[in-house]
Structure formats: C-alpha cells, structure tokens
Image: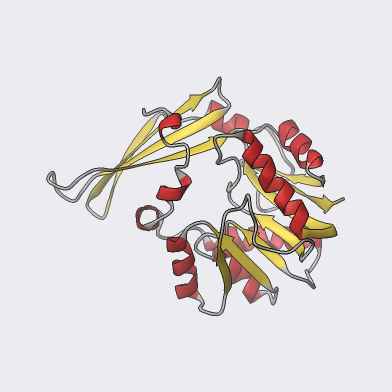
Amino acid sequence: MTSSQEAPEWYRDWFGEEYLALYPHRDEEEARDGVELLIRSCGQPSGLVLDLASGAGRHMLEFQRRGVKAFGLDLSKTLLVQAHRSAPELLLAEGDMRHLPFADGVFQVVANFFTSFGYFADPEDDEKVLSEIRRVLRAGGCFLLDFLNAERVRTGLVDRDERLLNGRLVVQERRLEEDGRIVVKKIQLHGADENDPVSTFHERVRLYSPDELQVILRRSGLEPELTFGDYSGGPACSDCPRYILVGHAV
C-alpha cells in the first residue's frame, strides 16, 4: 500500500462524490442514538450547538427534529451540498476545524461525531482542533468527542477486502504505520469497464489511546467527565466499537 506520507491531506480529496457513492446511506439510527447520547449527557441545549465535521447532515437533521438550534461546519463542499439538499434550512458553513470561523464562547455545546478527529499528519494540528473547540465553547459548555476504539482497530485490522458497488469493483487495503500509531486505508474504485481509470483515495487516522485523548483534552482546557463504548451509552471497554468522551470547558 502507498505510504500515508504521499497523501498527507487526504481529507481534502476523499469526501466528495466518490465517498457519497461508496457510502450512500450512512446509518440514520446511529445518528439518532448519537444525538440522544449527547442530550442525555449534556442536557437539552438551550443555546447554540456546533456539529463539527457535520458531513452530509445526518446529525444535523436529528438536532433539527429535536428542536435544537445547531450549526454545521465541514471542509467538504460536496457533503455540505448534500446536507443542504436534504434540508435547505440547515445552518451550514464550509471551513477548517483548525481555524473555526466563529467568535469566542458562542456555543453551548460542540459535538464531533463519527471519528472526524485524528486526521492530520502533525499531531499538533489535532490539538489545534481541541483548542478551537475550547475557544468557541462558553465556560462550562459541554463537548462530545466520538472516536474509535484504537486498540480494537489494531487487533482486528482486515488487510484487504473487495466488493462490487453498482458494477464497480471497490478494493480496500489497510495497514498500520508508525509502530501502530496510525491506521491507513487505501481505497481503489475501478471503473465500470476496463477502459475506465481507477480512482485512488486514502484515509489516515492517528490511533489515540483513551489515556492520550484525556491528556490532550485537558491540555486544551476540556475536562472529560463521562466515557462510553457505543452510542447506546454502554460503558467503555476493550472490545467496544467506540471511545466517546463527554465533558465541559473549564
């Protein structure tokens, strides 16, 4: 597989039309459970909520259904357009999570769902994201960071799989880099026939352990208080699919 260093800003290319074609229907029930977990942990928001890396808007739609005023921000224009098609009234903006285009302390809650953290080649950029979350949160405001279970990813890694999607062969290859601190996935979408070009994309996520996440959150002024292992609110565990942290801005 190609080294991740050849695609250090993979997130700028991947979350476009090809991503939507590969994942046309993300789980709406999962989004409902995630928002329910947030509200159960933080309380019903009376102020503004930021859905950071809001993607195609599935969590935004759930916030809307619950009467929560939310603002969605994402780097992908394609995913923002898709969200707008779903509900033109959604409040959406295009932007980089390292440099949030919002005033200090404007949000009561910031939620970062579905492993939209750990994307950057330099770990200092990940900490910039956390510092920005703290900056736009009011003092005492609530945050939710929804990350993967790093150890489960390492032990359960599938090197390669392939499937057919609408007549196109999709091949995915995975590997660990930097002594298991990075997981890289290479995605190849073959054309409908042999004369069509192959499109190649990458995903790259830094595998922060639970202890590491807690350390960098506290260093950024975010105090973790609750941890969960799934969207139903089960306790964090070694075999759980997620590692979800909820806490407040100090």
Q: Is residue 242 left or right of residue 28?
A: right
Can you name the residue that lies furthest to the left here?
Answer: 195
Can you name the residue that lies furthest to the top here?
Answer: 179
**Picture coordinates of residue 163, whole percent (x, y):** 30, 43
Q: Residue at x 69, y 41 (%)?
A: 127
Against 211, is 33 above or below?
below
Q: Quadrant of residue 7?
A: top left
Q: Is residue 228 left or right of residue 65?
A: right
**Picture coordinates of residue 51, whole percent (x, y):** 64, 61
**How many dots with numbers?**
0
For the N terminus, which image quadrant? top left
Q: Residue at x 57, y 54 (%)?
A: 96
Q: Residue at x 75, y 32 (%)?
A: 211
Q: Is residue 249 left or right of residue 7?
A: right
Q: Nearer the viewer, residue 77 or 205?
A: 77
Against 96, is 108 above or below?
below
**Picture coordinates of residue 112, whole percent (x, y):** 65, 53
Q: Nearer the viewer, residue 44 or 195?
A: 195
Residue 85 seen anywhere in this rendered image of the structure = yes
Q: Nearer the viewer, residue 219 or 104?
A: 104
Q: Residue at x 83, y 52 (%)?
A: 249
Which of the colour schemes (rainbow, by chain, secondary structure, one colour) is used? secondary structure
Q: Quadrant of residue 241?
A: top right
Residue 229 seen anywhere in this rendered image of the structure = no
**Picture coordinates of residue 230, whole percent (x, y):** 66, 47
